[in-house]
Amino acid sequence: MSTNHAELLNQLRGGLEKTLGMEYTLATLEEVVAEVEIGPQHSQPYGLVHGGVYCALIESVCSAGAAMSAMAKGGGGAVGLDNQTSFLRGAEGKKLIIRATPLSTGRRTHLWQADVHDETGAHLAEGRVRLLVTRRGEHSVKGLTKS
């Protein structure tokens, strides 16, 4: 089993992840899981979780996984090229659980998929994110790589 880097990712969380209230609970080369407590800041005018929240969460967990995988192979990290997110239903619970796994981890591109559930088990959204592996020094994450 791979080392869990969730604590490190939580220390490195940036603006959007902090704004959304995202907490990594598991972060390995095979799987990344995060949770978010749903609040009024996540809602659109009808009171449902905004679709952009799902897109951002899916991209965040997929990007974290791809970046860790790329760095483990000597790359500098990963940046998103494409995010395809489908919304399945509204949240019934008070927490979002986002789980990402790799479909392909090539030398220059990765494809990761993610599912979003709430704590009741309802499947809320799913997505795939295609990412470009950067070279060391390109778009480096402070604390993870040296520029």
Image (cartoon, grey):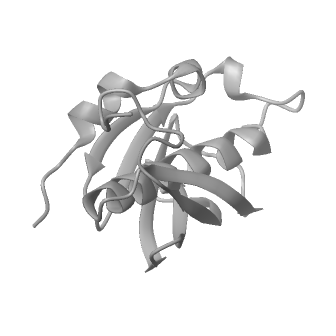
Residue at point 50%, 23% (across, down): 14
Q: Would you place residue 37 above or below residue 63 in this image?
A: above
Residue 22 x %, y %: 47, 31
Asked whether residue 25 appears in the rendered view, the answer is yes
Residue at point 28%, 50% (across, down): 27
Image quadrant in which the N terminus is located: bottom left
Front residue of this view, candidates 27 and 110: 110
Residue at point 75%, 28% (across, down): 43
Residue at point 28%, 42% (across, down): 25
Front residue of this view, candidates 122 and 113: 113
Front residue of this view, candidates 78 and 114: 78
Residue 94 x %, y %: 52, 34
Relative to residue 55, is residue 29 drawn left or right?
left
Q: Would you place residue 46 above or below residue 98 in this image?
A: above
Residue 21 x %, y %: 50, 24
Residue 13, quarter of picture? top left
Asked whether residue 118 appears in the rendered view, the answer is no
Relative to residue 71, is residue 131 drawn left or right?
right
Q: Residue furthest right?
A: 45
Residue 62 x %, y %: 50, 56
Relative to residue 35, is residue 133 drawn left or right?
right
